[in-house]
């Protein structure tokens, strides 16, 4: 199956249209929903050690996959409502990050940008 | 340019590898970073009306695009570290949602699942 | 009953000690838990209009109260684990905000600080 | 100085009133702002180990205190706008948690409620 985000965007748009939900799905509301799903993802991992989070049980992994999916659904909806290409925006941000975090400055250390 | 998420995953993985950051990027830590970016997205929209959020200024739209990109970067990293296909997981979740929110129950009304 | 935060801190500390949970309650983990509860609060309000959020149904209000309580529990735990006075820290931040947002600059308009 | 949350509520309310900001501060918007601050707190701790989060540097501790303060400010505002007593609501939630997490079930193990 395709891993195109455009096709996924259409699947999700059709889901929303069939339910006549678009009036509720302002970017503001979708962002709140995304925060909700990010929080549910956090709940899956909050009491695990970092080590445990790298090797979750099958049941935990399934929950993590579903919460990540929920975040992506709202991300795709926000981009669709505002009419921008999410993958292109992310490629542009990655190019910006290349400059913001030059290898020679940050190699082997990961911090907030203002802490280097 | 391709909108494949697999290609984006590789771009981001290379970025991390060049900086030797993978030791920091446990799924637990990446989830905290995702919550941080979700929060930054919320900050862009918190004082706007729903109406305003549908038609942001060019500068605001640019900020929203960058925050959405940051969320996607961490989502892609989590899936890459845990070895699952993010688009496939999202398609599976959409199929589940089709059953959870049947059109005849939810048409024209959007609520939490337990409030219908 | 007292509205002292110190007394509340003690109630919550006793709850944790009785369950022998303190080994799990690093500030890092507590922060993830707080993000989870903030997300649950967002879920209560995400599809409401601003108007509706000002006058929630009794059932909705009860849910909001409980989610706010959950956020405060983790906030109190973080301060207790790190040994600082949460009310004093908040008073100090309020004094800082007095200078950051002078009345003559911001009166009647609420934006991100860098947008004035 | 008092650690009463009622007095703090009044300090913060005056701050908002002087700036004529209350029209923006619907519970919905305040919740988004709270999610933003929760995200900023997460950013402070995301790349630290649990161990490091228990003994932050003085500068990091100061940042954590300020982010916790920001979360409390919005929590206090939500309760004030909706007219409930935040400490009382938290005491009530703690009593509920006493029953939800009985010592004999959960001693020494901390999980999501549905995972015991």
Image (cartoon, coloured by chain):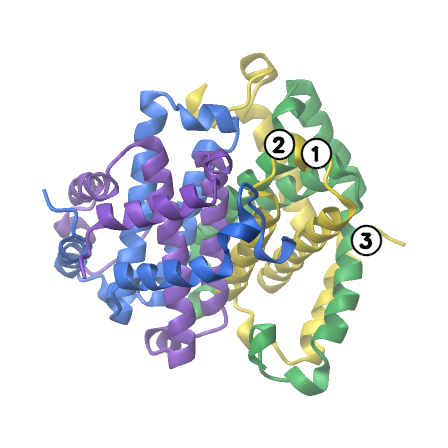
Chain colours: A yellow, B green, C purple, D blue
Q: From this viewpoint, is residue C113 visible?
A: no
Q: Where is residue C76 drawn, in percent x and y?
A: 33, 45
Q: Where is residue C83 drawn, in percent x and y?
A: 30, 32
Q: Which SS class for mark 1?
A: helix
| Nearer the observer, C58 or A73 | C58
CA separation, marks 3 and 1? 20 Å
Residue D64 in which image quadrant? top left
Residue pointed to by mark 2: A50
CA separation, marks 1 and 2? 7 Å
Q: Which SS class for mark 3?
A: helix
D12 up-or-down from C75: above or below: below
Whether pointer 1 and pointer 2 mark residues with C-beta atoms closer than 8 Å, the reply is yes
CA separation, marks 2 and 3? 25 Å
Residue at 40 percent of width and 67 percent of height: C64
A42 up-or-down from A75: above or below: above
For the image, the number of numbered tags is: 3
Q: Residue furthest bottom?
A: B104
Residue at 19 percent of width and 44 percent of height: C94
Which chain hosts label 3?
Answer: B
Q: Where is residue A19 drawn, in percent x and y?
A: 67, 80
Residue B74 in which image quadrant? top right
Residue pointed to by mark 1: A54
Tell me, yes or no, whether dots 3 and 1 are on the same chain. Answer: no
Q: Residue furthest top?
A: A104
Nearest to the eye among marks 2 and 3: give it.
2
């Amino acid at each position: 199956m395709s891993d195109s985000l455009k096709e996924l965007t259409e699947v999700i748009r059709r889901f929303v249209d069939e339910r006549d939900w678009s009036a509720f799905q302002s970017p503001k509301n979708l962002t709140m929903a995304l925060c909700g799903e990010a929080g549910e993802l956090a709940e899956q991992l909050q009491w695990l050690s970092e080590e445990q989070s790298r090797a979750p049980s099958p049941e935990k992994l399934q929950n993590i996959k579903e919460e990540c999916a929920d975040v992506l659904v709202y991300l795709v909806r926000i981009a669709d409502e505002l009419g921008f290409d999410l993958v292109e925006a992310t490629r542009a941000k990655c190019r910006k990050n290349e400059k913001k975090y030059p290898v020679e400055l940050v190699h082997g250390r990961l911090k907030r940008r203002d802490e280097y």
